[in-house]
Amino acid sequence: MKGFLKTLRPALSCLLAMTVLCGLVYTALVTGIAALAFPAQANGSIVTVTLKDGSTRSYGSALLEQAFDEPQYLIGRPLAVSDLSPSSGAQAQLVAGRVAFLQSLDPTNTAPVPADLVEASGSGCDPDISPQAAEYQVARIARERGMSPDAVRAVIAKYTTGRLLGFIGEPAVNVLEVNLALDGLL
């Protein structure tokens, strides 16, 4: 028994030291560096708007999708996570329902519905859509808001990001920021 306690004491001391070092010190250090180097991202990239009365209001994260389904707004990807096979009947029904919804918002638009408006992302929280998906919605938004299509395109262009380093990824339109700008909040 004496040998067991002699062995247990250093093991518990090591466990305690590593818990403090890795669980507290390292975590605090990385969090502190992130907060100093990237304060907006470290705090969730919250979109906060100063209102006319001087108060501020938070509308959500620029990194997470927000639900918009009214015709005057840019509509993003479906919020639901989909692990269905592209060839499954259930996936085909979901896509057909989403296509029908978008067409009901703008019956005059006969262009094919872009895939990112009817197919959920793997995470179900992608805040961006393609410029093509945004362009598909321009006429409807302009008509609903009494704006010119070019004015809507200008807002969309302002919140469209290009490819990283000019060749990595695809251009993307942030749906939340466009909608807040269309509402005159950004």
Image: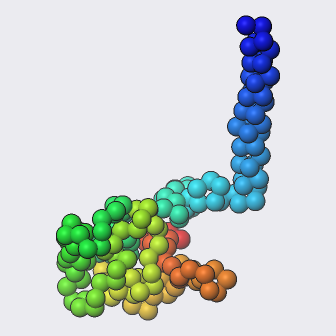
On the rendered structure, is 179 left or right of 8?
left
Q: What colour scheme does the image use?
A: rainbow
Counting the numbered discs, the total is: 0
Which residue does the image show at 19% across and 70% down from the upper left? 89
Q: Residue 91, position in %: x, y?
A: 25, 69
Give the vertical position of 40 relative to 110 (above or below): above
Which residue does the image show at 59% across and 60% down from the upper left? 45
Q: Residue 55, position in %: x, y?
A: 55, 55
Give the vertical position of 25 relative to 67 (above or below): above
Which residue does the image show at 73% across and 28% down from the upper left? 15
Which sits in the foreground, 33 or 122?
Answer: 122
On the rendered structure, is 80 left or right of 6?
left
Which residue does the image show at 80% across and 22% down from the upper left? 10
Quarter of the image with the N terminus is: top right
Which quarter of the picture shows residue 87? bottom left
Which quarter of the picture shows residue 146? bottom left
Which sits in the foreground, 139 or 160?
Answer: 160
Which sits in the foreground, 5 or 112?
Answer: 5
Visible residue check, residue 101? no
On the rendered structure, is 10 left or right of 139?
right
Which residue ends up furthest to the top in the rendered image? 1
Visible residue check, residue 111? yes
Q: Residue 136, position in %: x, y?
A: 35, 86
Give the vertical position of 10 relative to 157 (above or below): above
Q: Residue 14, position in %: x, y?
A: 78, 28
